[in-house]
Image: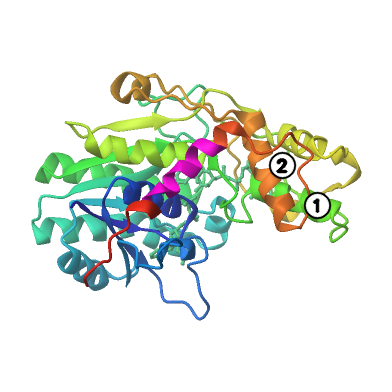
């Protein structure tokens, strides 16, 4: 049985990747931070098989990308076959408020992990969560050959992480691959990223619990995809014969304004009546236009995204409406989304972990 270690298991991508790896028969180990309140809301449903109550093949370990010894300890204890480095201070706006911390965790944290792998000397495959933010102000569309022009402390930290991953691959022969992922969203998306902020607000407005939605720059364009499809690429990238760096996106970009129109329009509302602009949500430097040219992923892994913009908005809207106790105005559950519910099939093949 293969063992995977996921840093950032409690995040959006970590939770979907855990479900996928369990469905593929892996034993999954995740690193979580100690916090004063529970921070495992996205993975709590995975602890036990709902059918027989048995423990899932998932185990959590305390650790932090800021602490080398914790990384060394977790890797020595788990002896993973694959490591997915998804942990990061991942919010671009927050990185301007906490540039040093972001550099330490998102940038140097990756170095600490690679050093722990090098010292442990195991034959492990390593995935680094790189990002379209690396391209920053580079003209769209962006591919693996587009030069990096990072525009935030977050993006600069990720640039360091990306290059140090390449350096450890070249210098020490570590099987290390980076997925350069464009924005990907889901009902599990953090509440302060723009898509989720919008879908939550629309549902709350409809439920009469919120009056206005305060936003920043509505003109930036993003290539938004569906997170469950993107974690599948992470896994497939590590199953490939050779390590590689790969751009992942849909090849379709929309403005934040278009997302607002689509989300409010879905429930029959006009966004202009509810949205207010608040300067606090603008960034000192903005990334105007991200659009993926992901043909290498198609050629190398046969990967094609299936969920497109309107379906994505619908999936997220339906989930947030349900959280508010409201009915979806659509025609039932999006058929494409049902495909990913299949991942819960791991629940049918759960085996108790013996440690
Ligand atoms: P997310 O929801 O913000 O999750 C981040 C994870 O990192 C959480 O589990 C968080 O733990 C953990 N973390 C934060 N600081 C840490 C630290 N010092 N030590 C250990 N763990 C720490 O992010 P995501 O959307 O799932 O994204 C996953 C990765 O892909 C991130 O590296 C992100 O930068 C990158 N990425 C994301 C996108 C996207 O559109 N989602 C696109 C490209 C790249 P807590 O739960 O305790 O906070
Ligand atoms: O902003 C604009 C904002 O915070 C998208 C992270 O996962 O994807 C994400 O970074 C756009 C920006 O994501 C608000 O100015 C307007 O232009 O949802 P976001 P991001 O900055 O693109 C990349 C690929 C990552 O790697 C990151 O980890 O929306 N915007 N008004 C706003 N954004 C936010 N958050 N809140 C607003 O009120």
Q: CB of residue at label 2: within 8 Å of ligand 2?
A: yes
Q: How is the image coloured?
A: rainbow
Q: Is residue 72 visible?
A: yes
Q: Which element type, helix, strand or loop, lies under badge 1?
A: strand
The residue singled out by tag 1 in the image is: 213
Percent position (x, y) of residue 319?
66, 49
* Residue 343 belongs to magenta span: yes
Q: Is residue 65 left or right of 212 when viewed as pictured?
A: left
Residue at image position (38%, 42%) is: 130
The number of numbered discs placed on residues in the rendered structure image is 2
Q: Say few, some or many: other residues with alpha carbon within 10 Å of mark 1 (under 14 / 14 to 19 / 20 or more).
A: many
Q: Is residue 208 above or below residue 228?
A: below
**Quarter of the picture holding the C terminus:** bottom left
215 is within the stretch colored magenta: no
**On the image, which quarter does residue 295 sit in?**
top left
Which one is nearer the viewer's eye here, 129 or 140?
A: 129
- The magenta-colored residue range is 338-346
Residue 38 drawn at (x, y percent): 51, 74
Residue 217 got which mark?
Answer: 2
Numbered badge on residue 100: none
223 or 240, which lies in front?
240
């Amino acid at each position: 049985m293969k063992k995977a270690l996921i840093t950032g298991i409690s995040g959006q991508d970590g939770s979907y990747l855990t479900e996928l790896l369990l469905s593929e028969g892996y034993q999954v180990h995740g690193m979580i931070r100690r916090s004063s309140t529970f921070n495992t809301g996205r993975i709590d449903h995975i602890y036990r098989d709902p059918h027989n109550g048995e423990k899932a093949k998932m185990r959590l370990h305390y650790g932090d990308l800021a602490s080398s010894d914790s990384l060394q300890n977790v890797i020595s204890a788990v002896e993973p076959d694959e490591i997915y480095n998804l942990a990061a201070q991942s919010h671009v706006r927050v990185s301007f408020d906490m540039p040093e911390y972001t550099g330490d965790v998102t940038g140097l944290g990756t170095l600490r992990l690679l050093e722990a792998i090098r010292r442990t000397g195991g034959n492990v495959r390593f995935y680094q969560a790189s990002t379209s933010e690396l391209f920053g102000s580079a003209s769209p569309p962006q591919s693996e050959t587009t030069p990096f022009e990072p525009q935030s402390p977050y993006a600069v930290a990720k640039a360091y992480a990306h290059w140090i991953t390449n350096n450890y691959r070249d210098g020490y022969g570590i099987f290390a691959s980076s997925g350069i992922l464009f924005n990907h969203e889901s009902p599990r998306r953090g509440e302060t990223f723009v898509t989720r902020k919008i879908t939550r607000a629309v549902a709350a407005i409809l439920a009469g619990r919120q009056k206005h939605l305060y936003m920043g720059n509505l003109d930036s364009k993003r290539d938004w995809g569906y997170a469950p499809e993107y974690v599948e690429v992470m896994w497939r990238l590590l199953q490939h014969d050779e390590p590689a760096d790969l751009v992942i996106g849909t090849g379709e970009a929309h403005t934040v304004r278009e997302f607002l129109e689509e989300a409010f329009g879905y429930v029959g509302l006009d966004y202009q009546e509810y949205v207010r602009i608040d300067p606090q949500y603008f960034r000192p430097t903005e990334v105007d236009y991200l659009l993926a040219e992901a043909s290498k992923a198609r050629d190398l892994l046969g990967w094609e995204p299936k969920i497109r913009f309107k379906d994505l908005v619908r999936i997220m809207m339906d989930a947030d409406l349900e959280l508010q106790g409201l009915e979806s105005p659509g025609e039932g559950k999006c058929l494409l989304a049902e495909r990913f519910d299949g991942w819960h099939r791991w629940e049918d093949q759960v085996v108790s972990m013996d440690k």
